[in-house]
């Protein structure tokens, strides 16, 4: 099973695009932004583990990487 949410690699100007399938949720500049996008997409974030590959796929670095 692949992750529904994808956090894309950092852009040259900073931040990372976050998508839910084909839908772009926005550009995140930190973990707080990712959590807000997930909440708006209907994901229960209370017990969410950001490193759970079944929920979030991080491309180009994990939750601590925001600049190239």
Image: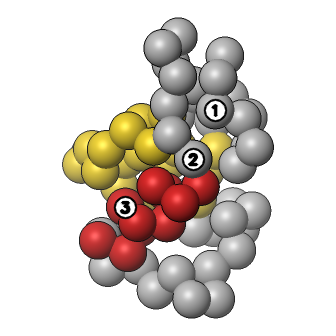
Residue 13 left/right relative to 22: right
- Mark 3 surroundings within 10 Å by alpha-carbon count, few (fewer than 14), some (14 through 19), many (20 or more): many
Q: Nearer the viewer, residue 39 or 19?
A: 39
Residue 39 left/right relative to 52: left
Could you tell me if the residues under marks 1 and 2 are in contact, i.e. CB atoms within 8 Å? yes
- Assign the N terminus to one quadrant of the image: bottom right
In this rendering, does residue 4 appear at all? no
Q: CA distance from mark 3 to mark 1?
A: 16 Å
Could you tell me if the residues under marks 3 and 1 are in contact, i.e. CB atoms within 8 Å? no
Q: Nearer the viewer, mark 2 or mark 3?
A: 2
**x, y percentage for residue 46?**
57, 89
Which residue: 38% across, 75% down? Answer: 39
**x, y percentage for residue 7?**
52, 44
Q: CA distance from mark 1 to mark 2?
A: 7 Å
Q: What is the total number of numbered labels drawn onto the structure image?
A: 3
**x, y percentage for residue 42?**
32, 79
Please determine whether, in this image, residue 27 is positioned above or below residue 52.
above
* Of callouts 3 and 1, the N-terminal one: 3
Q: Which mark is residue 37?
A: 3
Please determine whether, in this image, residue 26 is positioned above or below residue 61.
below
Which residue: 62% across, 80% down? Answer: 48
* Of callouts 2 and 3, the N-terminal one: 2
Q: Which mark is residue 38?
A: none
Please determine whether, in this image, residue 33 is positioned above or below residue 1.
above
Reading the image, the residue beneath label 1 is 66
Residue 34 left/right relative to 36: right
In this rendering, does residue 49 appear at all? yes
Reading the image, the residue beneath label 2 is 30
């Amino acid at each position: 099973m692949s992750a529904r949410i994808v956090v894309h690699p950092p852009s040259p100007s900073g931040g990372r695009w976050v998508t839910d399938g084909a839908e772009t949720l926005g550009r995140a500049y930190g973990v707080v932004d990712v959590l807000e996008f997930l909440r708006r997409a209907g994901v229960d974030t209370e017990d969410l583990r950001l490193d759970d590959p079944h929920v979030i796929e991080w491309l180009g670095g994990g939750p601590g990487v925001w600049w190239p």
